[in-house]
Image (cartoon, coloured by chain):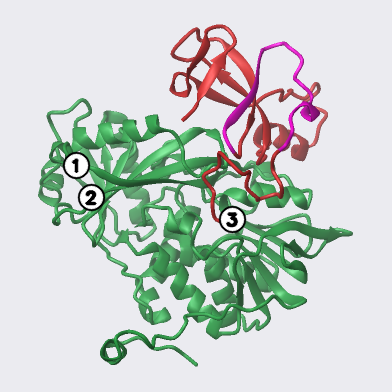
Chain colours: A green, B red
Amino acid sequence: MKKKYSIFSLVKNSLSDNQNWKKMWRNPDPRKFYDVIIVGGGGHGLGTAYYLAKEHGLKNIAVIEKGWLGGGNTGRNTTIIRSNYLWDESAHLYEHSLKLWENLSSELNYNIMFSQRGVLNLAHNEHDVKEIRRRVSANKLNGIDSEWVDPHQIKKLVPIMNTENCRYPVLGASYQPRAGVARHDAVAWGYAMRADELGVDIIQNCEVKKIRTAKGKVQGVETSKGFIRSNRVGVVASGHTSVLAATAGIKLPLQSKALQALVSEPIKPVINTVVMSNAVHAYVSQSDKGELVIGAGTDGYNSYTQRGGYNIIEDTIRAIVELYPIFGKMKMLRQWGGIVDITPDASPILSKCEVEGLYFNCGWGTGGFKATPGSANVFAHTIAKNKPHKINAPFSVDRFVSGRLVDEHGAAAVAH
Amino acid sequence: MFTIRCPYCGERDQSEFSNGGEAHVTRPKDPEQISDREWSEYVFIRANPKGIYYERWVHTHGCKKWFNAVRNTSTDEILKVYKIGETPPPLKEFKNTIKTPSGEPDVGSGNFSVKKP
């Protein structure tokens, strides 16, 4: 039964005191065999299952999640969506994703609160200016709506910004008006609900302990609910991908680190765009509830503890207060960390591997949320056809052998 | 946030140190003889365990000396610190508290999603 959300369903359910809303997805016991198993129930994993069922007609699919849906990095990011990346390969991937974002609420008939409020990437020194102007030009050549704005225009967009009287004055910025934010857990829930309707089994609180292989082929996964057989396994486990890959004897060029974020107490609307700064390392946007959503850099050591150090928050808050003196007396409400898997070139891995039937979607590092629909879409193609989509072909794990890297450290915008 | 016992200066705040990644990575003796894949492993692939990890630190805001440490990456507990050039302690010396590949230790971890009551 397809669940439709509209103004009428809202009115109808409010009349019955909101007691009659149906569960959004089933909670099935795992079957013995699936055509495809996706390990990881975040946005990328659930989206992959959705596109496998919808666009590739596969019926017998499971998503296996060790905790709850969207409880990993899908629910731990700062929800920024943009596509202003430097190289053609990345621009195509992230722009593919942005185009899917623009229609995602209506495709899923679920309000993911996608808000195209624009993003500014600030330049604080001569080198930043040259680098960002180059990126703006590269974006334009790829048909991405990126433009260079001077401090005067920045002041108009964000009047509260201190552009002059600070240690690192703002000399300009790139501006992408189509960029924005979305409600991150709604993305996981929307994909989960529609995947479930297409027959995908979503199995929560079930931990994959080992990927079983034999003679170079994948056999299935050993889980806390027993062994589940499958010929095709897609691993979408962000920070824990290395751990899972190791159980199949595969080494990936990934390093897992904590990336922190924090939110302030809610205030009246004060900033209506997203502002990121690579050089002083602070980024901020305001949520619909009025909280400032602030992102920090990665902690500089490998870790699987989802928290990170206080000194990193301190550095970020220092930069925020310098850029926006008006925030100086605000209180921060919550802080958290997510474990991100970082590749040497700051670009993701969407790839087959030497084990037949085993696929990896990982290495999104500090910027995976924006790519959720695009990544899921091309990864589903990769699994269904057993060959990459032309958009993710450059993001094969073999690039670390051939040397054809996609170096996006500049556009990644998070220090690591 | 945690403290690290620098083998030269004693216990200091972690923010005084910079991490140097995996310890004991050796450069291949004859780079011209090995395959691209082996070279790629040396350049790009580093251990990334959830659990016992041998790593390098430098006391950036202190004595500026490099040293090695053994840390449990699932709790950030530092188990041993030793100087550059000293023999690394064997893995069996440390009791690995990790129950399953992605399972959590009883204390010290921030991942509560799979923690049993």
Residue at 31% from the left image edge and 89% from the top image edge: A13
What residue is drawn where x is 48% and y is 74%?
A191
Q: Are tags 2 and 3 found on a single chain?
A: no
Cα–Cα span, label 1 and label 2: 7 Å
User: In terms of secondary structure, where does tag 2 sit?
Assistant: loop
Q: Nearer the viewer, mark 1 or mark 3?
A: 3
Q: Residue A281 in the image: x percent, y percent?
A: 33, 36
Mark 1 and mark 2 residues within 8 Å of each other at the beta carbon: yes
Does residue A107 show up?
yes
Instruction: Write down the chain letter for disc 2.
Output: A
**Residue nearest the observer in this picture, A272 or B67:** B67
Closer to us: mark 2 or mark 3? 3
Amino acid type, mark 3: Pro
Badge 1 crowding class, 10 Å Cα cut-off, few under 14, some 14 to 19, many 20 or more, is few
CA gap, disc 2 and disc 3 = 31 Å
Percent of width and height locating residue A386: 70, 68
Reading the image, the residue beneath label 1 is A330
Q: Are marks 1 and 2 on the same chain?
A: yes
Q: Which residue is mark 2?
A: A265
Q: Which residue is mark 3?
A: B117
Q: Position of residue B28 (x, y in %)?
A: 77, 25
Q: Is residue A351 left or right of residue A333?
A: right
**Is residue A416 among what the camera can see?**
no
Chain of the residue under label 1: A
Region of the chain picked out in magenta, as a range = B75-96
**Label 2, residues with CA under 10 Å away: few <14, some 14-19, many ≥20:** some
Is residue B85 on the magenta stretch?
yes
Q: State the residue lying farthest toward the front.
A: B117
Q: Chain of mark 3?
A: B
**Which label's residue is closer to the chain start, 1 or 2?**
2
* Residue at 48 percent of width and 54 percent of height: A73
